Amino acid sequence: MTATVREKYSRALADGLSPVRRWGEPVDVARATAALVRGDFAFATGSVVHVDGGLSIQRL
């Protein structure tokens, strides 16, 4: 799915496109999912958990 833009985004990530300067991996999503399933966020209600390496953080 990202094959045609992988090189472009790899450079952008390395240059600081997001705070986490790497591609996301399936394990990143799996860890967040496991935490939700375990109930680690039992007091959170109606929350959105962004597993995007900080890509959605607003910048000036």
Image: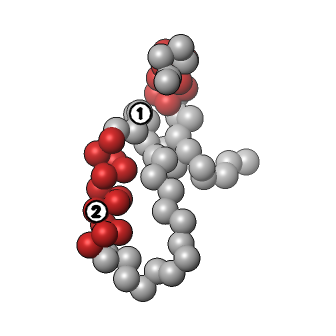
Label total for image: 2
Q: What element carries label 2?
A: helix
Query: Distance of mark 2 from mark 1, alpha carbons?
Result: 20 Å
The residue lying at 55 percent from left, 76 percent from top is 46
Dot 2 corresponds to which residue? 34
Residue 22 x %, y %: 40, 34
- Return the mark for residue 60: none
Farthest-out residue, bottom? 43
Other residues around mark 2 within 10 Å, as few (<14) / some (14–19) / many (≥20) = few
Which mark is nearer the camera, 2 or 1? 2
Residue 16 x %, y %: 53, 34
Residue 30 x %, y %: 31, 52
The residue lying at 54 percent from left, 66 percent from top is 48
Residue 44 x %, y %: 46, 80
Above or below, 33 against 13 in this view is: below
**What is the three-letter code of the residue carrying label 2?**
Ala
Residue 11 visible in the current orientation? no
In front here: 37 or 48?
A: 37
Q: In this view, does 25 lie to the left or right of 47?
A: left
Dot 1 corresponds to which residue? 23
The residue lying at 35 percent from left, 69 percent from top is 36
Sequence-wise, which precedes: disc 2 or disc 1?
Answer: 1
Q: Is residue 39 left or right of residue 44?
A: left
